[in-house]
Image (tube, rainbow, N blue to C red):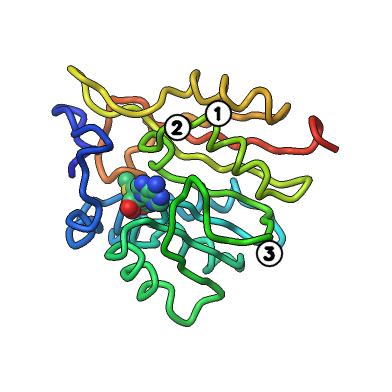
Amino acid sequence: MTHTDDHTDPPAAGEIDWDVEAAGFDDEPDHGLRDLEVRAAWAARLRSWLPEQPADVLDLGCGTGSLSLLAAEQGHRVTAVDASRAMADRARAKLAGRAAAVLWGDASAPPVGERSFDVVLVRHVLWTLPAPDRVLRHWRELLRPRGRFVLVEGVWGTLDPVGIPADRLTTLLAPLSADIRVERLSGDPLLWGRAVRDERYAVVADMGDLKD
Ligand SMILES: C[S@@+](CC[C@H](N)C(=O)[O-])C[C@H]1O[C@@H](n2cnc3c(N)ncnc32)[C@H](O)[C@@H]1O
């Protein structure tokens, strides 16, 4: 799937077979992070979004595990979840030898038992899930009292765009967090390996005030 191409319309989320996508997934610059400049750009953003101290990070819909690996390299303990066995296998291989575990399961209801986390990290996944408001409420329950969402999303395509606009996501997050920051990412071609025109952003939402 080439959802990073803003000149064509990508398929709807339900039409994508992620097991089939897995083999070529890392060919996209922002997926595989093979280009050192692209990788460094994501590493810098991630460092700014994640806590300074080593944290327990839950990467949901981890794909081939590229962001999980960056987080592990930055000293965090990572639990990664994906519903595609082919993606999870690739993530497991990428994260071998790191403080990381890769689980096969549904991001909407991650198979983590009673565990809780400092960060729920999700890139390019929430838009594929039915009922994102319900999913966000569940993810909130997986966070420790002062936990954080790091959600990297966007809107792809022109004629029939798919994705979730930042305004909608912040509206969904408003009942859960009083501290929501949107960082626009479209203007940084280093993140994507090229210039892009569509909407790309990260939301960093800190928990605490509403529930403590
Ligand atoms: C666009 S890819 C993003 C992968 C990764 N987060 C990244 O940024 O490189 C979407 C990923 O979400 C996974 N996914 C889709 N629906 C899922 C679900 N309900 N539960 C877990 N993973 C899911 C797919 O298998 C795929 O690996």
Q: Earlier in the sequence, mark 3 or mark 2?
A: 3
Residue matched to label 3: 54
Marks 1 and 2 in Cβ contact (< 8 Å): yes
Compared with residue 83, is residue 210 higher up or lower down, i.e. above or below?
above
Looking at the image, residue 211 sits to the left or right of residue 139; the answer is right
Q: Label 3, label 2: how many angstroms apart (C-alpha)?
A: 24 Å
Q: Secondary structure at mark 2?
A: strand
Q: Residues within 10 Å of mark 2 (few under 14, many from 20)?
A: many
- Looking at this view, is 128 or 183 the one in front? 128
Q: Residue furthest right?
A: 212
Residue matched to label 2: 201
Q: Position of residue 174 (x, y in %)?
A: 65, 23
Q: Amino acid at mark 3?
A: Pro
Q: Label 1, label 2: how many angstroms apart (C-alpha)?
A: 7 Å
Toward which corner of the image does residue 19 lie, by quadrant? bottom left
**Residue at 79 percent of width and 30 percent of height:** 210
Q: Amino acid at mark 1?
A: Val
